[in-house]
Image (cartoon, rainbow, N blue to C red):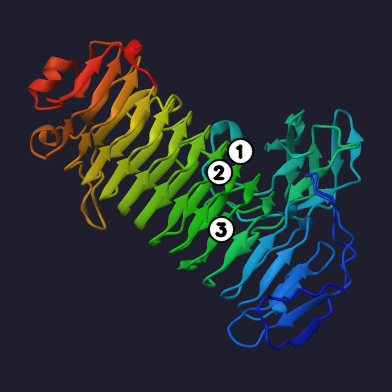
Amino acid sequence: MRLLVNRGMTALALMVLASACAGSVDQSTTTSARQPTPPQSTTVVRIPGPLSESVMLSPAMDVERVIASAPAGTAFIFEPGTYRNVSIEPKNSMSFVGQPGATLNGSTVLEGFTQQGSVWILAGINAEGRVQGNCKEVALMCSRPEDVYINSVLSQQIEDANDVGPGTFQLNYDTGVLTVGDDPAGQIVELTTTEFAFFGTASDVTIDGFIIEKYANPAQSGAIQAKSGNTLALRWRIANNDVRFNHGVGIKLGAQNVAEQNRVYANGQLGIGTGPGGFDNIIRDNEVYGNTTIGFLPGFETGGMKLTTQTRLLVERNYVYDNAGPGIWTDIDNIDVTIAENVVENNLGPGIFHEISYRAVIKDNTVTGNGFGWTQWLYGAGILIAHSPDVEVTGNVVRDNRLGIIGIQQDRGTGAYGERELRNLYVHDNIIVASEGSSGIGQDIGSEAVFSEWNNRFESNTYYVNANEYFRWLGKVLDFNTWNSFGNDLEGQTFEIDAFDP
């Protein structure tokens, strides 16, 4: 029996919660974490007054029952090991801390496959989650949240069992037969079966130090889901976690949440997202990479982050790279947004994309090698401001993207704070390095007001470019002198690209 005592106590009232070992719990793990011998019971120390209770948990325990039985304010510490198919709905002021190697795994290990020709089958699968999302033609099953991992390598779900081969699988939802194209002998085969690791609307929750992987969360939902329906959870702190291999979004924030120092990678749809109507959220010091693995359409909330309908949003000091979509995407009625000091590299979509939103400052970011997967019109930019008023773009280094800094105007109607128009765009004191592409403004509404009447301007930027004609204005790509003649960058400079010294 383990006794966990909070510091600073003057009196103790002991409450012992017996927790029978769950014999069916799978302790296998894809990490190298030590597998401890689980305790047979848990001692909870109740501290009189405002201090919370603390509980030590092990993988062999019925973790969900222990947490559900505990009062608000309880602190839980998870010993190393794999907690399989655990789904936690916190109460107010609960904290959850994982010791190194503590892994919440939303999958079930599958055994007993039978070979049939060049494939292997397993009957009796009863798993069918919510269908959600828009898929590419080559990945039409991406909207199904059931994924298969073989030794933590993702297999692609396909429609027809007759087409299954190496690296693919098919799940017949009518018959419950799973067909895989890789020999499962001696391998760990996992099927995602549980929707959320953490979910709900409790306030003041801490989630710190876990590996959170292989949850069957549908598209547009997070493995960590700080909301329920349209109700957002307040003041969650999500820190120091590895959130990976989940079907939909890695982390979905509520309001007044902080996501910091997490690694969020290889999730099927998106790295970090937000619930609608959030406010005062902070996303900082995270590493967000390799997301969008299952074949969702690029315009369907893909990439590193997609953040919607936020007020007073801060995104700072994140490293966002190698995502199959935009790096940082603020879309739909965001206002008072700051995107600062991020490093955004090699994302297939725009590096930083502010779309049909409002007041924002995008400053001091390093944006490199983005946009080459989004070749339609002017969308593949390092920094893209689309149909959004009152945006300042300053102090950024924008280097070797498909396009540099671009503003665009299309007919996108009216939003929560007025017309969705590219007005008062102020692009100044940036460094743009480019061997191709352009920077400037484009429109397809048949009006030149975006150039002449809406107070959009470029000032004091420095360009290192190969092409003499690099500057986009009035439907043309211009040389620097002509660009100046429209009042842009009168204090700006251009140099040959070889002169750039990073």
The tag earlier along the polypeptide, 3 or 1, is 3
Residue at x-position 50% and y-position 68%: 233
Callout 2 secondary element: loop
Question: How far apart in space, not on screen, are marks 3 and 1 (Cα)?
Answer: 25 Å
Within-10-Å neighbours for mark 1: few <14, some 14–19, many 20+: many
Q: Quadrant of the C terminus?
A: top left
- Disc assigned to residue 238: 3
Looking at the image, residue 249 lies above or below residue 397: below
Given contact means CB atoms under 8 Å apart, are the residues at marks 1 and 2 in contact? yes
Looking at the image, residue 19 lies above or below residue 32: below
Question: How far apart in space, not on screen, are marks 3 and 2 (Cα)?
Answer: 19 Å
Residue type indicated by callout 1: Ile
Residue type indicated by callout 2: Gln
Q: In the shown orientation, is residue 390 left or right of residue 54? A: left
Closest to the observer, 46 or 420:
46
- Quadrant of res 122: top right
Residue type indicated by callout 3: Ile
Closest to the observer, 258 or 326:
258
- Quadrant of res 498: top left
Mark 1 lies on residue: 294
- Disc assigned to residue 269: 2
Closest to the observer, 157 or 307:
307
Of tags 3 and 2, which is closer to the observer?
3
Callout 1 secondary element: loop
Q: How many numbered discs sit on the rendered protein?
A: 3
Q: Position of residue 397 (x, y in %)?
A: 35, 29
Within-10-Å neighbours for mark 3: few <14, some 14–19, many 20+: many
Question: How far apart in space, not on screen, are marks 1 and 2 (Cα)?
Answer: 7 Å
